[in-house]
Amino acid sequence: METMKDIKARFASAKEGEYNALFRHYENDERSGVQKLIQQYHKKLQALEDERVRTESMKKYEHEYEHLGYLCGIDEVGRGPLAGPVVACAVILPKDCDILWLNDSKKLTAKKREELYDVILEGAVSVGIGMASPERIDEINILQATYEAMRQAVSRLSVQPQLLLNDAVTIPEIQIPQVPIIKGDAKSVSIAAASIVAKVTRDRMMEEYDKVLPEYGFASNKGYGSAAHIEALKKYGPSPIHRKTFITHLS
C-alpha cells in the first residue's frame, strides 16, 4: 500500500488536468489522511475556477476595446509619500493573457506582488517604466510629475498601443486615445498589471535607499509618513530623497 508521503507527492507533482484521475483513483481509500488530501485539492481546484471567473470579469474593458489593437494599462504608485520618486508603469498584455490573481497591488501581499511581477514581465507584450524624482515633484508638483512619469512610461513601450486604459486619470499632452477608469486597478487586468509592476519597482528602490539612509526606515514605510518616519525626520532632518514641498510643516 502506498504511504501518505507517496500519495502527497503524487498530488503535489500533478498538473491541474490530472487531479480528477487522482480523485477517482483514491476515492475508496478509507484513510482519513487520503480523504482530507482529496478534499484539499478539490478546494484548490474550486479556488482556481473562482479565480478564473473573477479574472474574466476584469477583462471587461479589454474585451470591449480589443478590436482596436494593442491596449495599454497605466497606473502609478507613490503620489502620497514624503520621500522617494513617483513611479508609473505602462503594460500591454497579450489578448490571450491567462495570468491569474491580477488585482489592485494594495490588495496583494508583498510576496504575491513579487511573484506576479516576474510573471507579468515574462508574459507581457511590452512594459514601460517612468518616474519623477523628488526634485522634479518639488519643481512641478506631484500631479504634473505623475503625468510626466506616465508619459515617460508610455514612451518606453516597444510597441505603440492604440488605446490607454488609465487608473482614474486622463493624461495631458498625449495623442493616444484614453479611457480613464475609476478604481481601474481592480477592474482591468491591464491596469492591475501596471499597478503591480509600479509598486514592486518603487518598493525595491525604497529598500535600496534604506541601505544608505537607514535612520528613516524606508524599507518598511516606503517613504510614507508613518509615526516612526516623521519622528526620524524631526530628529535627523530631511534626507536627499525627501520631497521638500511635502514636509514644510514637519521641518
Image (tube, grey):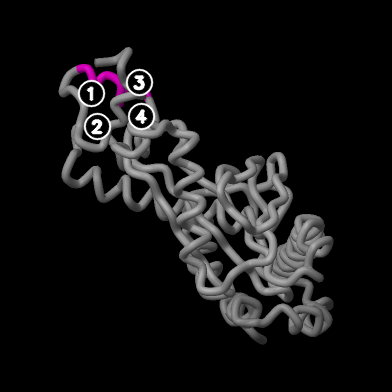
Q: In 3D space, how far apart are the residues under numbered discs 2 and 4 (Cα atoms)?
A: 11 Å
Q: Amino acid at mark 4?
A: Leu
Q: CA distance from mark 2 to mark 1?
A: 6 Å
Nearest to viewer (mark 2 / mark 4): 4
Q: Which mark is residue 82?
A: 4
Q: Which mark is residue 232?
A: 1
Does label 2 or label 1 sit earlier along the sequence? 2
* Residue under pointer 2: 216
Q: Is residue 233 magenta?
A: yes
- Report the residue at 29% width, 15% height from top: 250
Residue 53 location (% of width, % of height): 81, 60
| Helix, strand or loop for disc 4 | loop
Label 4 Cα crowd, 10 Å radius (few <14 / some 14-19 / many 20+) = many
Tell me which segment is drawn in magenta: 226-234
Label 3 Cα neighbours within 10 Å, binned few <14 / some 14-19 / many ≥20: few
Badge 4 or badge 1: first in the primary sequence? 4
How far apart are labels 3 and 4 at the CA level?
12 Å
